[in-house]
Amino acid sequence: MGQPSMNTLKVTLPESADSQALPQGNIKMSARDVKVFYGASEALHGINMDIYENEVVAFIGPSGCGKSTFLRCLNRMNDTIDSARVTGKVTLDDQDIYDPSLDVVQLRAQVGMVFQKPNPFPKSIFENIAYGPRLHGLVDNKTDLEEIVESSLRRAGLWNEVKDRLDAPGTGLSGGQQQRLCIARAIAVSPEVILMDEPCSALDPIATTIIEELIDELKGSYTIAIVTHNMQQAARVSDRTAFFHLGNLVELSATREIFTNPQDTRTEDYITGRFG
Amino acid sequence: MKTTNMMPEDQLDLAQKRDRMQQRVKASLKRRHAQEKRFKGMGMAAVVTALAFVTLLFFTILSKGLPAFWQATLTLQVYFDPEVIRIDPKPEKRSDESEGAFQQRYLAWQTQLGFVNFNRIILDSLAREIPEAPEYQRDALRLVTSGERFALRGLVEKDPSIIGQTLTLDLLADANVDVWMKGNIDRNLPDAQQQLSARTRAWVDELQARGVIKSKFSTALFMNPDSRSSLASAGLAGAFMGSLMMMLIVMFLAVPVGVASAIYLEEFAPKNKLTDLIEVNINNLAAVPSIVFGLLGASVFILWFKMPLSAPLVGGLVLSLMTLPTVIIATRSTLKAIPPSIRQAALGIGASKVQSVFHHVLPLAIPGILTGAILGVAQALGETAPLLLIGMSSFVASVPATPFEQSTALPVQIYLWQGNELRNFFEARTSAAIIVLLALMITLNALAIWLRKKFETRW
């Protein structure tokens, strides 16, 4: 088979995703030689990556390539898996997050997470948002708390839909609304980085569009790392894209670059749909 | 690509093939439907059989036990004759008197009261209905159960001002009178095989006809402890209190300890060989025959720790040990069923492990934990075997006031009554005790269901 021509790519790129306009600002998080072992098997083979402040970086790759595993290294969610072991160095603002003296609770307040399946607490909408601020003692009185709840819901674009029923259970919302509720819950504790693990995979196309627009709005204030199986989504929302394959970071560059001029044949094969 | 350049013969062949397939499917349908119907029918039959047996069980127990709540009762004019009850006035505590001195005086007065012949009082009251009663004292006194003289004494002790008065009182008839009236003994048996003399039997029939002796709802079954001298007033109060105390001990010991261990094992303990071993052993403990726990209680609590025999405290401890594995297993399976996404959500927002468990996992698990705990307690309530080994099967004629006193338990009481010699009286009483135990069980289970519904969180 010959070289596939670039017009076979079904990915449309927004104008803004131009490699020249990339935010090469401060390094927010960086990973050096990060390896993850599940028991004896090595799932990630030494990942090096810098994530810049206020950028959206997308992780793509076939199932089982390690992209979610790497994402979970960034807020130490792998700690919750007994058999998982992480080596290497991950820093947040030059602070080693695997330093034993660092409290993982504080880290997770700085690096929030949104999961694949919307997982609101089986409590009221208000309580879902209020839980984090209350937990970390961010508010002194009820008025402050109400303010945080309102502003978080506004930022997540959910306020107008739920403002009349804050006492209703969060689990009663639709899938897309639930996921936005989870995003609102994550931003209620004012994190610096938000990790999203396939946030739209359980949602319909309309809900997906809303979440993507939301990500676009949020990137002004937060650094976002998003794992996705949907390459159009990666192309639409991210500034840079990282392609993972079999536990290796194959390629990381500006999104436009990855989709129009991949350097590695594996990347090219994957984005043109030859495997995956 | 292939379908487009298929030859006409091939197409024909394919059509035939498809036809054959369709016919085969059709042929198998009948068999499949028959299979489904058979399975459904067997299931229904099983359910109906089970229901029939449950109905039969309840019917026999209720039809045998309910009459025991109504007992033969004599309504008599009782004259508290000052000539017979010759006692000093009831001592009052004087201001200059010490507590000990007063107790001593009171005891002396009680002793004096104890010497009063209350049989005389009962006989006199009977004489008002049966003029010839004083001549045949033995036959007459068989009418009223012997425990009633103590009831009369209690009335006087409580309020000595009734001396000299005539009160209309309900006195429980003797167990044999009850048996005679209810027809639980063959009336045609010869005198030698009758429990009551011919004269007494005639009196019973006469008094019954005059309405002096009637079947009345009796609280004796609930208010009195067990008795062997006055069978008609034998009750469940002692066994009930014993069971209640044991249940409280189980609830406050086995449930918190079990739930706490389950939470630790499920949420916090590392998964390694040691915790695997513990898990296997807990599952094994749940399958250990309960009598083994009784042996353990006898050798550890009674022989080592020198705890009292027949005490609800020991019973409660033994039943707690027995219930622990049940509570742990129920709690663990409830915790396992809580979706991990809730834990992740809490951890992801910065909750610590303990916070994620106590703020999010436990509230969701509470209905399941409560159900497990209450079913465990209900199981302990019905347990008999381990109690036999720690001396709780002995005859105890008092209601325990503390868990250290001798007592028995409801299921043990049923076992004891079941073995009583006066079969025709105790068959009904045993069933009545079973009804009380079943009612308690059903209440506990209903409570479990209610609590589950109350705390259930809808997703």
Image: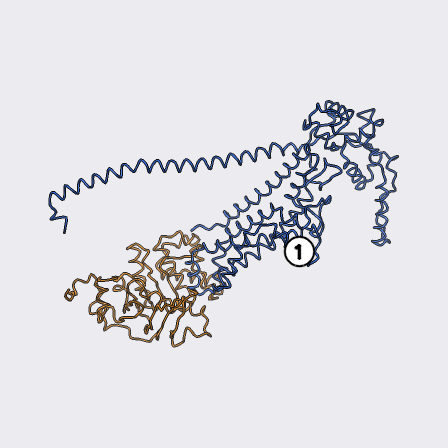
Residue B28 on image: x %, y %: 29, 38
Q: Quadrant of residue A39?
A: bottom left
Q: Quadrant of residue A263?
A: bottom left
From what the image shows, is residue A168 above or below residue A43?
above
Q: Is residue A223 visible?
A: yes
Image side of residue A36 versus residue B298, left or right:
left
What residue is drawn where x is 32% and y is 65%?
A226
Which color is chain A depicted in?
orange
Instruction: Looking at this view, name the residue that lies furthest to the bottom.
Output: A94
What residue is drawn where x is 58% and y is 52%?
B323
From what the image shows, is residue A234 above or below residue B95?
below
Give the SS element for disc 1.
helix
What residue is drawn where x is 61% and y is 47%?
B383
Residue B235 on image: x %, y %: 69, 39
Quarter containing the N terminus of chain A? bottom left
The front one of B346 and B307 is: B307
Q: Is residue A190 visible?
A: no
Q: Chain of mark 1?
A: B
From what the image shows, is residue B102 above or below residue B434?
below
The front one of B218 and B277 is: B277
Quarter containing the C terminus of chain A? bottom left
Question: Hey, what amino acid is under mark 1?
Answer: Ser
Residue B228 on image: x %, y %: 74, 39
Image side of residue B136 versus residue B312, left or right:
right
Residue B367 on image: x %, y %: 50, 51
Which color is chain B depicted in?
blue
Disc 1 packing (10 Å; few <14; some 14–19; many ≥20)? some
Image side of residue B110 versus residue B70, left or right:
right
Q: Which residue bears the numbered disc 1? A: B299
The front one of B186 and A20 is: B186
Q: Quadrant of residue A198?
A: bottom left
Image side of residue B170 versus residue B454, left or right:
right
